[in-house]
């Protein structure tokens, strides 16, 4: 007699999951088999690419760096510094492409000034030096009757100097952003118009006349946006929603009635926007890398970096050139400066500031210098990897392939970092696996712009920038998946920090624990470095070295030395890891 053998449950836990459903129809079966085949194909392709990558890493040196930090922290600028140092020829050849970005940065600065002048402001003290009759008498902006109906300027990126006293270390963690105090829409117009009370028409004032003369800037702003932003990225022009234009009404073009005060033009990292510009670029056969571009044979002056067909060649530069005297007059006007000061609009500290170089950068023969390229501002969205091999001229490291991953740092962009260290969803596992384990990030450079202690995030005006950086740093340090990745901290924008401290802005006003320590660069940067170091020590899953530098990544001389140290450190780490492969 034979006994029935009981069915033993499988030892493989996946068996249960993978077993086809008992009532599967022939069509469902076919579908399932096709899906399994496709999954198998993808899996094999991934395995092949992992293998190829491993072999490549063994054969030649591939060093991978990830740049992290909040928006405007200096990630893309650091990337440009690497490119400048390691692929100088390519960097130099690309400088002309940055001219369009710089043109847009200039237009934006001028627009901020005009909007600031048109917005109502707080009551100034009776003894305000801003209303000195002498300065008014010398000013171009003497009698503009500012229309009272113009809506207030959106608050600047700077927090008010209120004591928020919420128990946190950061006074401004829930910063009140709008300028406090009593609103007095007439105080600027008082200041600007008292010397000519009879002027009533908009056009009768020098400021309004000047605004009218600057109208073409609005047109080139639209052109430049069209040129820099690919057609499928048109949300770039709608980032913050429209607000009222401060250009005089009636001027019709693509952006009529809409102000771009609050929005920033962005690009996805990678060669996309450069490609679009360079395809249209006129070649300069005799270009030798001097600071001036060679003239075009037909016109005797340089041609533009790009031509989308919307413009005559180099139209933005021609317009900027023809408006330069007015822009210079506006920026150098005493009363204008006083109003900007009073409203705490510190353009010099905003990214993409070129107003002190207007004569040079609006010249028809203008070719951006290395420093200009580093100062230009173009926001990043998405995540992208830049590969570059060191040129022979870069010295002993030539032949090493560097892969630098740049990400967009604004809050809406941070979910895109997830593949690098999110341990959440299962579908990200494979990507993380690729990025961190097999492709390996050798180090992360984390940028914390410590000059932002009195600023709020552009995308969330309730959050202090320094506090945001600290929280981000904490999450990077504590991430288990990054436990073996070296972290390098750049306490960045030290040049701006120094200027702020020198101008009398006190760190202790925003960071309570700083109390009455010296308010100078050395003391402040040491203090903040200590804070970041403590977080690193406390939150790192495993003990690891702490590398920190006080940086101004727009400064080529100091940054070259720092990048050399980082490079040596990363290569050492890389060699250590390759031995483990
Ligand atoms: N003065 C000064 N400006 C800096 C420094 N670092 C960066 N900048 C400027 O700050 C602006 C923002 O820098 P980016 O490199 O674009 O910032 P990012 O981190 O890439 O920002 P997102 O792309 O928005 O994430 C640029 O105009 C830079 O020139 C610095 O150390 N000092
Ligand atoms: Mg960027």
Image (cartoon, helix red, strand yellow):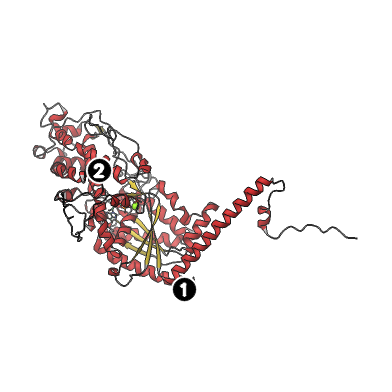
Residue 478 or 431: which is nearer the viewer?
Answer: 431
Task: Determine whether the beta carbon of the residue marked 2 sits less than 8 angstroms from the nearest atom of ligand 1.
Answer: no
Spot occupied by residue 76 in the image (x, y as percentages of width and height) = 33, 55
Pick whichever, 572 or 22, lies toward us. 22
Between the C-alphas of marks 2 and 1, the distance is: 51 Å
Residue 317 placed where, x, y %? 19, 46
On the rendered structure, is 460 left or right of 322? right
Label 2 CA crowd tier, 10 Å (few <14, some 14–19, many 20+): many
Tell me if I can see residue 501 in this picture.
no
Q: Residue 567 carries which label?
A: none
- The percent coordinates of residue 187 (x first, y second) are 20, 33
**Visible residue check, residue 2:** yes
Question: Residue 403 at x, y = what percent?
Answer: 38, 62
Q: Is mark 1 on a helix, strand or loop?
A: helix
Residue 441, located in which quarter of the rendered image? bottom left
Answer with the quarter of the image where residue 258 lies: top left
Name which quarter of the figure residue 548 lies in: bottom left
Q: Are the residues flagged by discs 2 and 1 in contact, CB closer than 8 Å?
A: no
**Which one is nearer the viewer's eye here, 548 or 109?**
109
Q: Name the residue under label 2.
A: 108
Number of callouts: 2
Give the vertical position of 541 relative to 102 (above or below): below
What label does residue 579 carry, if any? 1
Compared to residue 377, the image places residue 434 above or below, namely below
Label 1 CA crowd tier, 10 Å (few <14, some 14–19, many 20+): few
Residue name at image x 26 percent, y 41 percent: 310
Q: Residue at x 20, y 36 (%)?
A: 215
Ranked by sequence position, the earlier of labels 2 and 1 is 2
């Amino acid at each position: 007699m034979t006994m029935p053998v009981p069915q033993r449950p499988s030892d493989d836990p996946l068996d249960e999951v993978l077993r086809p459903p008992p009532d599967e129809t022939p069509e469902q079966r076919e579908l399932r088999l096709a899906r399994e085949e496709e999954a198998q194909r993808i899996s094999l392709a991934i395995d092949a690419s992992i293998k190829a990558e491993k072999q490549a890493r063994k054969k030649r040196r591939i060093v991978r760096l990830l740049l992290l930090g909040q928006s405007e922290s200096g990630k893309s600028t650091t990337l440009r510094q690497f490119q400048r140092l390691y692929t100088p020829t390519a960097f130099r050849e690309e400088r002309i492409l940055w001219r369009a970005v710089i043109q847009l940065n200039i237009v934006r600065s001028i627009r901020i000034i005009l909007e600031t002048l048109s917005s109502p402001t707080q009551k100034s003290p009776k003894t305000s030096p801003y209303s000195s009759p002498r300065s008014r008498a010398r000013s171009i902006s003497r009698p503009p009757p500012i229309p009272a109906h113009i809506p207030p300027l959106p608050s600047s990126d700077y927090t008010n100097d209120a004591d928020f006293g919420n128990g946190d270390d950061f006074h401004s963690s829930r910063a009140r952003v709008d300028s406090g105090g009593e609103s007095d829409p007439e105080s600027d117009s008082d200041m600007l118009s008292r010397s000519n009370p009879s002027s009533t028409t908009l056009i009768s004032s020098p400021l309004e006349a000047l605004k009218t003369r600057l109208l073409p800037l609005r047109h080139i702003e639209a052109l430049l946006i069209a040129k820099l932003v690919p057609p499928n990225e048109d949300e770039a022009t709608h980032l913050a929603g429209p607000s009222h234009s401060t250009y005089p009404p009636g001027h019709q073009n693509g952006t009529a009635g809409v102000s771009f005060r609050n929005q920033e033009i962005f690009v996805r990292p990678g060669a996309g926007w450069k490609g679009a510009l360079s395809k249209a670029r006129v070649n300069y056969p005799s270009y030798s890398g001097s600071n001036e571009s060679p003239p075009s044979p037909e016109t005797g002056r340089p041609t533009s970096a790009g031509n989308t067909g919307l413009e005559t060649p180099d139209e933005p530069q021609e317009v900027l050139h023809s408006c330069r005297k007015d822009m210079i007059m506006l920026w150098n006007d005493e009363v204008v400066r006083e109003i900007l000061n009073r409203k705490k609009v510190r353009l010099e500290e905003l990214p993409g500031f070129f107003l002190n170089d207007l004569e040079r950068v609006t010249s028809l023969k203008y070719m951006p210098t290395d420093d200009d390229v580093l100062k230009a501002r173009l926001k990043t969205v998405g995540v992208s990897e830049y590969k570059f091999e060191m040129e022979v001229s870069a010295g002993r490291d030539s032949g090493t392939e560097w892969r630098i991953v740049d990400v967009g740092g604004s809050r809406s962009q941070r979910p895109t970092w997830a593949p690098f260290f999110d341990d959440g969803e299962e579908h990200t596992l494979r990507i993380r696996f690729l990025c961190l384990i097999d492709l390996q990030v050798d180090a992360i450079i984390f940028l914390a712009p410590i000059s932002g202690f009195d600023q709020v995030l552009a995308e969330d005006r309730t959050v202090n920038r320094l506090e945001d950086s600290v929280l981000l740093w904490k999450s990077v340090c504590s991430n288990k998946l990054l436990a073996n990745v070296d972290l390098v901290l750049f306490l960045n924008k030290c040049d701006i920090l120094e200027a702020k401290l020198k101008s009398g802005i006190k760190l202790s006003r925003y960071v309570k624990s700083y109390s009455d320590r010296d308010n100078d660069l050395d003391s402040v940067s040491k203090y903040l470095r200590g804070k970041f170091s403590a977080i690193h020590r406390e939150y790192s899953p495993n003990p690891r070295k702490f590398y920190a530098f006080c940086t101004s990544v727009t400064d080529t001389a100091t940054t070259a030395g720092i990048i050399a140290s980082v490079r040596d450190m990363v290569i050492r780490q890389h060699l250590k890891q390759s031995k483990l492969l």
